[in-house]
Image: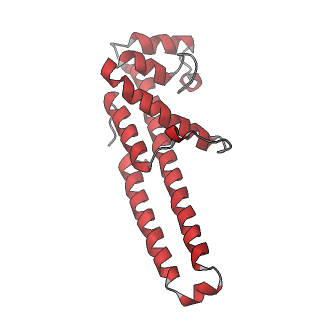
Amino acid sequence: MSVSLDFIWKYYEESFASLYAREEYYLNFDGYKNTLSQPELKDFFDHARKELEELVKFDFLSVDEGLIKDDFRNRVLNNPDKNPEFVRLSNIFKNKFDKIPYSSKSGDLCIIKAWKNVIAPDDVVIICNYETALEFRNWFAHGRNWDLSPTTILSVMDVKHTVKNVLSIMNISIS
C-alpha cells in the first residue's frame, strides 16, 4: 500500500483524537495517579501530541519529495516535449536521477530550482513557501540539533496546504 496525503491526514486526525481521549481517561483513572501527578500526565500528553505533529509534517514532506522526484524522472524520460530546464539538469548529472539534488540553498542545480524556472511567475511564491517547509524537513531529518527561526516553524495544516499547493502547480496527481 502506498501512502497518500489523505491517508497521512486521516492518520493524524485519528491519532490526535486518540491522544486526547487517552489523556482524559488517565486523568480520571485513580490507579494511575499513584504513578504520575496530573501536571506530569498533562506534560506527557502535550509532548506526545507535539511529536505526532512533527512526525506528520515530516511524513507529508517525505511523501511529497518522493512524488516530485518520480515525476521529474518521468518527465525527462517519457515526455517528447521535454522541458529544456529539466533536460539541462538531467544532462549535467548524466541522467543519474538519484544524484540530482532535490533542493539546495545555494546554486540552481536542483529539482526545486529547476521548477522555479519553468512555472508561471505568479506561482514562484508557492515554491518559496515550499522551500521554507523543506528547511523544517532538513532540520528534522538531520537530528533536530539546531534552532529554527520562528519564521520556519509551520503548523501541520500549513505543511499540508503547502504540499498540496506545490503538487498542484506542478500538475502532479495526489490521489
Q: Find residue 42 and report its horizontal and vertical position in percent.
A: 55, 71
Q: Is residue 118 left or right of residue 95?
A: left
Q: Quadrant of the C terminus?
A: top left
- Residue at 50 percent of width and 74 percent of height: 23
Most extreme residue toward the bottom, as rendered?
Answer: 30
Picture quadrant where residue 145 is located: top right
How many marks the image carries: the answer is: 0
| Colouring | secondary structure
- Residue at 39 percent of width and 60 percent of height: 13
Q: In front here: 55 or 6?
A: 55
- Residue at 61 percent of width and 80 percent of height: 37
Q: Find residue 18 and report its horizontal and vertical position in percent.
A: 44, 69
Picture quadrant where residue 71 is located: top left
Q: Is residue 108 above or below residue 68?
A: above
- Note whether residue 47 is visible: yes
Q: Find residue 153 and report its horizontal and vertical position in percent.
A: 51, 43
Q: Is residue 91 above or below residue 7?
A: above
- Note whether residue 171 is visible: no
- Residue at 39 percent of width and 38 percent of height: 162
Q: In front here: 175 or 61?
A: 61
Q: Find residue 84 and report its horizontal and vertical position in percent.
A: 41, 10
